[in-house]
Amino acid sequence: MEILQKNRKGNSVFLCCLIAYTVIYVGRVNLSVASPLMIKEGTADVARIGILGSIFSIAYAAGRLLSGRVCDRTAPKLVITAGICTAGLANLLMGTAPAYLLMALLWGVNALGQSVLWGSVLNSMGAVYEGSELKKRTALMTTSIPVGNIAGYLLSSYLCAGPGWRTAFYVPGVLCILSGIAARVILKDVELKAPAASETAGFGSIRKEIPKQDVYGKLIPAFLHGLIKDNSSFWLPTILAMQYMVKSEVTGLLVVIVPCIGFVGRLAYPAALKAADDDEEKVSLWCFIVTGICSALLITGVGSPVLVSVLIGVIYAATSMINTTFLSVYPIRFADRGCTATISGIMDFLTYLGASAGSAVFGIMASRLGYGSLYVSWTVIAAMAVILLLTGRKKCASAGK
C-alpha cells in the first residue's frame, strides 16, 4: 500500500510538472507567431522583434543563474506557483501594452517568471524518484518542451488568424495562472531532499565540484548551441511570412513541423545515448554535425517553404538533444548534493546567453543582409562546436582520461 501511494504521488507530481512546463512554452512561443502581424501593423519592425527575443533570453539567463540557490532551498510548490503566475500576468498585460517599451519590459518579466521553473521541476523529480527511474522521468520531462511548442504554435496561429495577435497573449496568460494555482495544490507535500552536511552546496563548494565533474568542458558548447536552438524556431514564422509570403494560417501549420521533429529528437535521446555507449558528449558531437549539414543545405537556397520548415525542424531537434545533455541529464547527477538547480542554472545561463546574443545579432543581420545570412552563421557556429569537441576529446585521450 505504501509503495502504491508513493507511485501515485510520484505520478501526480510528474504530471503536474509536465503540464506546468508545457504551458509556459505556450506563453513563450506566442511572440514568434504574433511577430509577423506585429510587424505588418507597425507595432515593431524586424530588428525590434529580435530585440524582444534578446531581452527574453538575457532576463531568462540571469534568472536561471541567480535563482539556482533559491530553488535548491525553497519548496517547489512556492517557486513554481510564483514563477508561472508571474509569467501569466506578464502575458496578459503584454496583450494590452500600448507601447513597444512597455512590451519590452513585460517580456523581460515573463522571462524572469519562467526562469525559476526548470530548477524546481528537477528538484521535484529528485524528491519523488531515485536512480534509473529518476533519469527516465527527467528525460521524459523534457518532452514538455516540444509539446509546449506544438500547442503554443497551434493555439497562437489560431488566435492570430481569428481574434488577432493580442489574444495570443491573453489566452496563454490565463492558462499559466490556472496552471500555477493547480501546482500550488498538487505539489503541497513535495519536500526537498536534505543533502548531507559535507555536501551542502554553497557557491564555494560548487566551484570545487565543477572542475571535478568536467562541467568546464561543456561551457563553450552550451553557449554555441544556445546561439542556434531557440533562434532557429523563433525566426521561422518571420522567414516564411516575409521571404516566402506564406499566409498566417498556413504559417502556423508549417511552423508546427519544427516542434514535432523536435519531439522525435527528444524521444530519440535515450537510444542515441545507448548507441554512443553512454557518452553524452559523443551524442552532442553527432548533433552538431547534423546541425551544420542542415544549415549548409539552407544556404543553397531551398525554394520550398515546407522543406525549409523540415530542415529547421531537424536543426531544432539536433540542438534539443544537445540541450537535454547540458540542462537535464548532467545536472540531475547533483541531486544528492543539493545543487541540481544551481548546476542546471549555470548551464542554462550560458545557453540563453548565447540565445540572447544570437537573437539581437540575427535580427540585425536579417534586416540588412537577408535571411540567408542566418544560415551561414549557423553553419559556422556548428563547425566551431565540432572542432572544439573533437579537440577536447583528443586532449582528454592524450592525457589518459
Image (tube, rainbow, N blue to C red):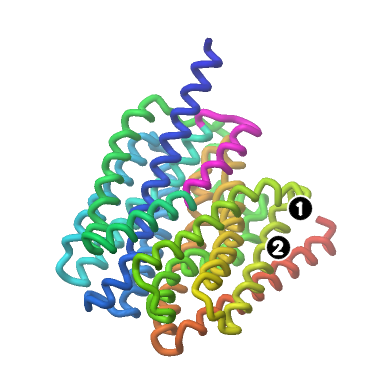
Q: Which residues are magenta?
A: 127-145
Residue under pointer 2: 286
Label 2: state its secondary structure: helix
Callout 2 crowding tier (Cα within 10 Å): few <14, some 14–19, many ≥20 = some
Label 1: state its secondary structure: loop
Check disc 1 and give the amino acid type.
Answer: Ala
Residue under pointer 1: 276
Frontmost residue, 43 versus 73: 43
Frontmost residue, 10 versus 370: 370
Check the image and report above or below for 340 versus 254.
above
Principal SS element in the magenta part?
helix
The residue sitting at 19% across, 57% down in the picture is 93
Instruction: Tell me residue 263's x, y (percent).
Output: 54, 52
Frontmost residue, 64 versus 177: 177
Marks 1 and 2 in Cβ contact (< 8 Å): yes
Which one is earlier in the sequence, the residue at label 1 or at label 2? 1
